[in-house]
Amino acid sequence: MRATIVHTPRECRIVFERADGSRADTSIPHKGPFPHDAMHYAVEREMGLAQGFWGLVAGGRHPDELAAMAKAAGHASASRAGVPQAHIVELLQAERLVECFEADLWGGPSDGDTLRSVYAAACASSHVPCLPLGDPCIAAIRAEVARLSAAWQGGRLELDWDEANVR
């Protein structure tokens, strides 16, 4: 699947072109200096998550329906979360980790133990297990985010999602 994220004066737009020729597009709210869905790309790719945001969209889901899907599966929000159904666990694990790396990007990197501790608390509030998050993995995600951030300075990102290449 190919995705194009473009910064416009009012919003960011993301267009997905799936391998089967189908398309989906949506707007992304401005949230910090780097697109939220691009952060998902870096995290999910490095963590090998096939059923996070990117995998679900590649599989045919429209990005706008994922929040409703999570709510229907027992996760209305982090503050009102119940034990989620199995099919959204990776989506929630990814979201909690994305939030940690967004904070890492916006506020400056923390040490690995602090990042893991915050991630563990976030996962506990969402009733999902933490993914293994060693220092090499943290470094790889940070490197991918840095690479994508540099490319984003032009206001456009082209990203390819291939399930076979998820690390």
Image (tube, grey):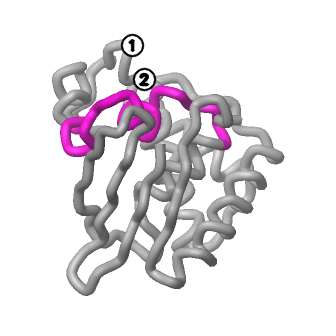
Q: How many marks?
A: 2
The residue furthest front is 21
The amino acid type, in three-letter code, at marker 2 is Val
Residue nearest the observer in this picture, 149 or 142: 149
Considering only vertical position in the picture, is 148 above or below 41?
below
The amino acid type, in three-letter code, at marker 1 is Ala
Q: What is the x, y in percent for residue 146? A: 67, 69
**Which quadrant, please, contains the C terminus?**
top right
Considering only vertical position in the picture, is 152 above or below 57?
below
Left or right? Give the position of 104 relative to 23. right
Residue denoted by label 2: 89
Q: State how far apart marks 2 and 1 are (Cα).
A: 5 Å
| Residue 119, image quadrant | top right
Considering only vertical position in the picture, is 137 above or below 52?
below
Task: Give the residue displayed 59% in from the left and 75% down from the top.
Answer: 151
Q: What is the x, y in percent for residue 37? A: 42, 55
The residue furthest top is 86
Badge 1 marks a residue whose secondary structure is helix
Task: Give the residue displayed 56% in from the left and 31% down from the top.
Answer: 49
Residue nearest the observer in this picture, 51 or 85: 51
Residue 79 in view (yes/no): no
In the image, the segment drawn in magenta is 46-67
The answer to whether the residues at label 2 and label 1 have Cβ atoms under 8 Å apart is yes
Left or right? Give the position of 89 relative to 62. right
Residue denoted by label 1: 86
Q: Is residue 155 magenta?
A: no
Considering only vertical position in the picture, is 100 above or below 44?
below
Badge 2 marks a residue whose secondary structure is helix
Q: Is residue 52 magenta?
A: yes
